[in-house]
Amino acid sequence: VDRPRPLVAGNWKMNGLKSSAKVLDEIHAGYTPGLKAKVDLAVCPPATLVGPLALQAVGSRVAIGGQDCHAKESGAFTGNVSAEMLADAGATYVIVGHSERRQYHGEKDVDVCAKAVAAHRAGLTAIVCIGETREEREAGRALSVVKKQLRGSTPVDSNSQNLVVAYEPVWAIGTGLTPTSADVAEVHALIRDELKRLVGKADSARVRILYGGSVKPSNATELMAVENVNGALVGGASLVAADFLAIAGAY
Ligand code: PEP
């Protein structure tokens, strides 16, 4: 089976100013030939920095991504940014359906799917986020919730080039808590199996399934070693270049 090349993506959330260019410089400096041979890197800054960081990253092999996009290409949607705008600014990825978007902006699977369709239309790779809440896990519903979210949030035109799935248990995001390796393995196996239906058996093995939620240098080696974990979506730790690089170095 072709194992997909791992991807470590940083989600800066609502953090970062012009001065954050130095973080990207440090990432470039630490993205050694040895690391480049093993793992892809992406940085997803706030929308204001997508253009500047994409220019800064030209020639570096660090990809730049947005954190969200509108489903439409353009129009009367004050405050929103389209996938085409992100692509025009130099992004090649966009995160859609992050739990903070689902929680604070009421995004449902159908909305997330429309955003992923927009990402594909614009030529971007969609990083589709799914994951259960603490209540759902405690009720024994983690697997059914993840399956439903995956089915509802991924467009039919998905393939291993334009889709990355990020499993992010909501209760693990920003909390310092992480699931056990066995729990991560169970969910990622379910996602891999579901992907057969979505993109076909051959291509399903090539789709990158990231784990996200309190990934740090201290737990990255264990989490990245889990079967069907093809990288990480990193929030807090991605703001510090040394931590982000140490996580990538877990491969
Ligand atoms: C995230 O926001 O996608 C995330 C995983 O955050 P953290 O790493 O801070 O838990």
Image (spheres, grey):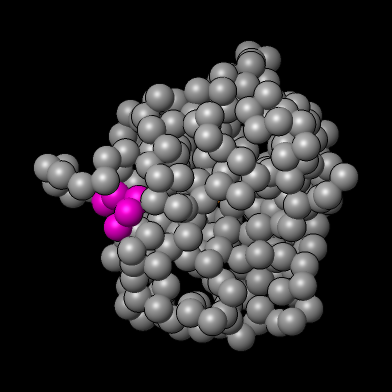
Residue at 65% x, 81% y is 30
Q: Position of residue 28 (x, y in %)?
A: 58, 81
Please report the residue visible at 71 percent of the width from the left and 74 percent of the height from the top: 36
Residue located at (64% from left, 16% from top): 144
Q: Residue visible at 68% across and 44% down? A: 207
Residue 31 as seen in the image, left or right of residue 83: right
Residue 25 is situated, as x and y percent measured from the top left of the image, at: 51, 83
Position of the N terminus by quadrant? top right
Residue 56, given in percent of the width and then of the height, sits at 43, 81
Query: Is residue 43 shown left or right of residue 250?
Result: left
Q: Nearer the viewer, residue 52 or 168?
A: 52
Q: In this orientation, does residue 242 appear?
A: yes
* Magenta-colored segment: predominant secondary structure: helix
- Front-most of residues 27 and 206: 206
Give the side of residue 73 with respect to residue 251, left or right: left
Q: Is residue 36 left or right of residue 88?
A: right
The span shown in magenta is: 81-85
Residue 184, visible in the rendered structure: no
198 within the magenta span: no
Location of residue 220 (image quadrant): bottom right
Q: Which of these two is toward me, 196 or 241?
A: 196
Is the C terminus in the top left, top right, bottom left or bottom right quadrant? bottom right
Residue 40 spot, x, y in % from top left: 66, 65
Q: Quadrant of residue 117?
A: top left
- Is 82 in the magenta? yes
